[in-house]
Amino acid sequence: MNNMVKTTIVAGTVAVLSSLATLALVGATNAGSSEMPLFTESGSHIQKVMQSPEESAVDFVSAAESTVNGVVSIKQYATPRQNSYSYASPFNDPLFEYFFGEQPRQQQRQKPEQRQTGLGSGVIISADGYIVTNNHVVAGAERLEVTLNDNRTFNATVVGADETTDLALIKIDASDLHVIPMGDSDKIKVGEWVLAVGNPFGFTSTVTKGIVSAKARNISAMTQSGNAGIESYIQTDAAVNPGNSGGALVNLNGELIGINTAIYSQTGSFAGYSFAIPTSIVKKVVTDLKQYGVVQRAVLGIAFGELTAELAKEKGITAVNSGIYVGKVQDRSAAFEAGIQEGDVIVSLDGSATNNTAQLQEAIAKHRPGDKVKVTYYRDNKKHEVTVTLRNALGNTEVTRTGDVLELGCAFKAVPKETLRQLEISNGVQVAGLKDGKFKEAGIKEGFIITDINNSAVNSAEDVEKIYQAIMKSGPEYDKVMFITGIYPTGRKVYYAVDIAQ
């Protein structure tokens, strides 16, 4: 195994007070550093750093000038946790005072003050104060302070955040702000010049240059660190460092094409590769967060893997060399309704190639449940096309809002009668498609069969939703818990308490 630190995109801001940097670890970190000066000192001589003819012909100045005022610094503040250790003092003992007289009292501990626990960047996307940044820049914050490039400072509120894409939308009370226009990340090409704009190490308004070195990059696959959510990054060699998280990646027209999110490094500082979330995903996510408070996430409803040479040989696939191999089609899913079958190889979705997992994720992430998309696939080495109506994780096309049952992070399916008989239970609904959410946080595993919630019998997904909504509408905000009784297919009975408070 090599010495490369394995990658995890941090869902939550890491407090690094020494550098005041929010880290999204891919090796260890997130975004930006300053550009190389035109002159460097070597011994007693001054050496001029020559630019290549290609660089000299490119106008970086206009793009830099048009974007630095649209990138902000975001400071995160939180109250440090108090030490739970306590000790007995003789001054609190009445007998001590009886024998030795009244003694000076200890001062009561002051409530800890908020401290700065992280630093990141953000991009202004509307003149009235909406700013997009990374979820890990704002996660866990008790207060967010936004500083504009002209040094004006505002407190910010979180409109919504999405851990799956590591994006967040925040708002400041301001007007007539400088906006970086949204560009089309689908149109950028490998080799194209780009600029990264942000606040590395607390240095404001820093611009670095580079080229797009790859598209649709999946970091988790590259580092074998497990799936960290939807990943289809733009890879560049623009220098980024801690503090640039949430900053802008722009083209030479000054258009936003990505949100800088992570780097790949052995040391935690820039080592040649940085990664940005493309605007094809950013536009969809921030629109949902603004309108609904939560992302409207569509799913195709398949278990899949990438087509490899070995798999193609094993399955006798000769018509295509790459694509998404369908391993299983889920019941009540969009793929099931459209007739997609196990063994099919999906090669494009609405004209966008799906040669790998990242490309498929990006293609689907642009859409909402209810959208119709054209899926091109091969079956028995013959090409087919079908129009698919995408659904949500519950198998329908209804709009999800903050507080909806989808925040549990799973879907539900009927339990086969034979399974009910074998387990000697009369009712239940099975957890399927488990993802990040309340259930996973509570320790619930895929395949768990829920028999009752808060002493109410459960037979369907609708029953779970009714109970969930009833809990959300009643009682104080801090007292919203689902007490779940159930059984695993192995026969092991388990009880869970799922905190669903907002």
Image (cartoon, rainbow, N blue to C red):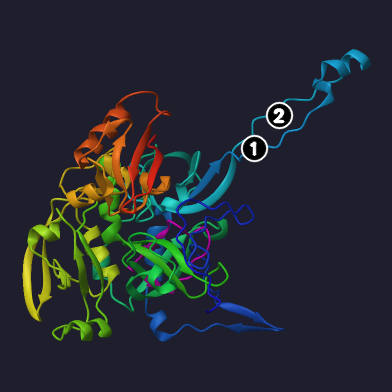
Name the element at disc 2: loop
Residue 216 among magenta residues: no
Q: Residues within 10 Å of mark 1 (few under 14, many from 20)?
A: few
Residues 265 and 428: in front is 428
* Above or below, comparing residue 486 to residue 234 in the picture: above
Q: Main secondary structure of the magenta part?
A: loop
Which quadrant would residue 378 be assigned to in this image? bottom left
Q: Is residue 195 visible?
A: no
Splitting the image into 4 quarters, where does residue 255 fall? bottom left
The picture places residue 273, in percent across and down from the top left corner, at 45, 73
Q: Quadrant of the C terminus?
A: top left
**Mark 1: amino acid:** Gln
Q: What separation in Å lies between label 1 and label 2 (alpha carbons)?
A: 10 Å
Task: Residue at 12% x, 67% y: name it.
Answer: 341
The residue sitting at 19% across, 81% down in the picture is 315
Rendering coords of residue 29 (x, y %)? 51, 63
Kindly indicate the quadrant of the structure image that contains residue 158. top left
Residue at which label 1 appears? 82
Tag on residue 109?
2
Q: Nearer the viewer, residue 407 or 237?
A: 407
- Tag 2: amino acid: Arg
Disc 1 is placed on an element classified as loop
Magenta span: 235-252
Q: Is residue 245 magenta?
A: yes
Q: Please say if 49 is above or below 91.
A: below
Comparing 386 with 327, the one in front is 327
The reply to whether dot 1 and dot 2 touch (C-beta < 8 Å) is yes
